[in-house]
Amino acid sequence: MSDKVLLYYDEAMLGHNPTGWDPAHPEWTAAVQALLRAQYGSEEEAARRWVHPERPTRLSVVRDALLEATATNAEWRHPRPAGPVELGRVHSQEHITLIEALAGRACWLDRDTTAVSPESVQAAKLAAGSGVTALEAIAAGDARRAFCCVRPPGHHALAERAMGFCLYNNVAVTAAHAQAALGMERVLIIDWDLHHGNGTQDIFYPINDVLLCDTHCSAPFYPGTGQIEQTGTGAGTNRTLNVPLPVGSGNTALIAAFEQLFVLAALVFEPRVILVSAGFDCHYLDRTFTMDATGFRHLTRIVMDLADRLCDGRLVLMMEGGYNAESLAGCARACVETLAGGPLPGLVRQDDDPGLAAVADAVAYHAPRLAPKPT
Ligand SMILES: [Zn+2]
């Protein structure tokens, strides 16, 4: 089978460039400026050095790294923006109306620095539409795998609220499209971003035919959710598998969580497609976890093997977080090279990985509860 990879990118996603302060919320401005003063020592130094972490460079460095790496076996495509029907499957009409009304404006939506610039709304619709467009191409048989170079990220966005730099929940919009429009009735979402995918969890919490497997840094780390006991509600019970990990966790713990839990969960769930919230902020350059590019290659290979085994290879990776330009570029390149059938270099292991005990706890908790696919 072909190892062709579809790469989704549109320059308009660089137009999302939140800067400045929101004059309508002086209390948010004051709170964030106080944090920055504490970080940089003085107001002047903070003003000089602070840039919004979710900045256009995050995407341009990934684009450049992939252009360099993938002369063959990869095909660049433009996404179409997600439309109201696609967004409306996971977001309330009120939320969509609120976001749409921000087109052409610059303001903050929350004191957590979720913010927009005049072109952000179009960027957000292209980010959500990337997964939708990629899945349609995969359903049409153009390829089996896709990597979506997108921003703003999506996995913190709730049905009714923007949060954590996320306006629309890109991976949730994609999952809902798979089910509603493409006949892929069971969707596995794997979220390996450093932060818990609280928005994705919340949207699918009562849903039986979406399985969410999420590794992340434990609360109280942002956003403070993702406890092991949060497993879903009603028909969605045991369809959310959280693996919270301590600061310092790395390749060995993440891979153990995948091999010892997520693979087993996928085998009994039998997804028709696998979507990955592929943040790269577990990299050691983001200073909380200690993963490196070899770890991301191995995680990618694990999900590729699962997709090949369970759902004819259908697999879409969508960028989420990752705030160091060097590690973002290197890890995105590592993932795409792996998706394209590249070699799997040796894994940098850490036998005393501080996350291993937490993985063992999560496996012990979740393994007896794994539920077969819905009938
Ligand atoms: Zn993140």
Image (cartoon, rainbow, N blue to C red):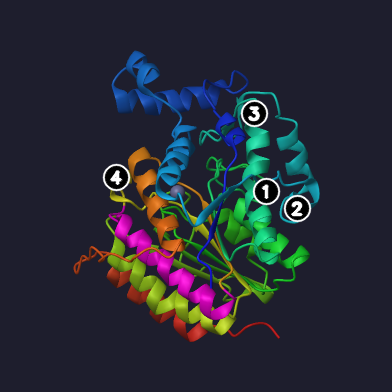
The amino acid marked with disc number 2 is: Glu
Q: For the magenta stretch, what is the residue range?
A: 289-312
Task: Report the disc number at residue 340.
Answer: none
First of labels 4, 1 by sequence position: 1
Q: Is residue 303 magenta?
A: yes
The amino acid marked with disc number 3 is: Glu
Position of residue 243 relative to residue 50, above or below, is below
Q: Which quarter of the image is occupied by the C terminus? A: bottom right
Q: SS of the residue at dot 1?
A: helix
* Residue 153 screen position, x and y as percent: 55, 45
Magenta stretch: dominant secondary structure: helix
State the residue position of label 3: 119
Q: SS of the residue at dot 3?
A: loop
**65 or 89, which lies in front?**
65
State the residue position of label 1: 129
User: Mark 2 touching mark 3, by CB under 8 A?
Assistant: no
Task: Report the disc number at residue 285.
Answer: 4
Number of marks in picture: 4
State the residue position of label 2: 86
Residue at position x 37%, y 26% in the image: 36
Label 1 crowd bin: few (<14), some (14–19), many (20+), radius 10 Å: many
> Does any portion of residue 92 appear in the rendered image?
yes
Residue at position x 75%, y 31% in the image: 101
**367 or 277, which lies in front?**
277
Residue at position x 23%, y 63% in the image: 348
Question: How far is disc 2 from disc 1 in space, using C-alphas?
Answer: 8 Å
Say whether residue 191 is left or right of residue 94: left
Question: How far is disc 3 from disc 1 in space, using C-alphas?
Answer: 16 Å
Question: How far is disc 4 from disc 3 in space, using C-alphas?
Answer: 29 Å
Please name which of the two marks, 2 or 1, marks the residue nearer to the observer: 1
Q: SS of the residue at dot 2?
A: helix
- Judged from this view, the residue extending furthest toward the top is 44
